[in-house]
Image (tube, helix red, strand yellow):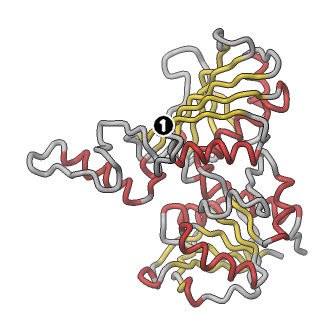
Amino acid sequence: MGYKVVVAGATGNVGREMLNILAEREFPVDEIAALASRKSLGTEVSFGDKTLKTKDLDTFDFTGWDIALFAVGSDATKIYAPKAAAAGCVVIDNSSLYRYDPEIPLVVPEVNPEAVEQYKKRNIIANPNCSTAQMVVALKPLHDRAKIKRVVVSTYQSVSGAGKAGIDELWDQTKGMYVPGQEVAPKKFSKQIAFNVIPHIDVFLDSGETKEEWKMVAETKKILDKSIKVTATCVRVPVFVGHSEAINIEFEEFLDEDEARDILREAPGILVVDKREPGGYITPIEAVGEYATYISRIRQDSTIENGLNLWCVSDNLRKGAALNAVQIAETLGNRCLKKG
């Protein structure tokens, strides 16, 4: 016996991935509905070997449905998630709207699966920011062993994190570089993204950090441990899919790089590829379409007493969004909504 599942935002990059992953992982679905805005009504999307026609999110009745995966952005979520929750359907939301609400759990199943049980307060569970999700998967097993004091992270984030408009802008600008008179001015990003990097994701705050950087700090504390100090610099790079992170970690006690490597090899959701030779590491293009968070370049930091450096790569549309949402649904089913 399975679940009645809704995917809201089914025509977007993340929504399509949610449908793909639900099918790939054989999530127990008895019935599924693909929802979209009225302008995309009737658009066909794939679910395994089936083709679904999208229904209108605005008029959909969530009564009798078990789980809704939302990938519609904060504005639409603010309208429709409470409606779904009030109808008894548990919402797993990919937007930033509910992540910092103390009554709503923010969950990465490899890190804090027990938090899903808090869903009953509002019938909503939040999915973290894509850059946070992969980082905390890497940090959790090391924190359990040696207790992390401080994290310094620099991200290299793909344009798919900015949606289809980001992907299109990189593609169009790249083509335009080779055709005189066909140059494409920045629109989605603040500066040219093709053959460039931009140290600016989301809006600037009064502190000088961007909101993306603030998110990584706040979400890591909520998911993993509020006592960890985190500082981030988030950078957009001309990569279509796959976020990378250079992470420096300071621990309460010494942790040898070889032991850290062994710990990470045994940790859920992680694959270690760490050979000290050309090509002995994972890059974003190799992570596309994969479930794992990849860890490479594990090494001691000699500038502090108890420090490690590592390189962390993941498909941001999967672990950073759609996969994590489906894993939350799986955890919810196993812990709270058991059927049959």
- Residue drawn at (87%, 62%) of the image: 117
Left or right, 338 with respect to 221, comes to right
* Count of labels in the image: 1
Question: Dot 1, how many residues are within 10 Å of its Cα: few (below 14), some (14-19), or many (20+)?
Answer: many
Asked if residue 151 is positioned above or below residue 129 in the image, the reply reads above
Left or right, 52 with respect to 324, comes to left
Q: For residue 96, which quarter of the picture?
A: bottom right
State the residue lying farthest toward the left.
181
Left or right, 120 with respect to 188, comes to right
Element under label 1?
strand
Viewer-nearest residue: 187 or 57:
187
- Residue drawn at (74%, 59%) of the image: 328
State the residue lying farthest toward the top.
302
Asked if residue 20 is positioned above or below residue 80 in the image, the reply reads above
Kindly identify which residue carries mark 1: 156
Where in the figure is residue 156, as x and y percent of width and height?
48, 37
Where in the figure is residue 232, as x and y percent of width and height?
57, 35
Image quarter of the C terminus: bottom right
Where in the figure is residue 143, as x and y percent of width and height?
80, 31
Viewer-nearest residue: 206 or 144:
206
Viewer-nearest residue: 16 or 121:
121
Left or right, 264 with respect to 278, comes to right
Viewer-nearest residue: 106 or 171:
106
Image quarter of the N terminus: bottom right
**Amino acid on which the number 1 mark rests in the picture:** Tyr
- Residue drawn at (82%, 18%) of the image: 253
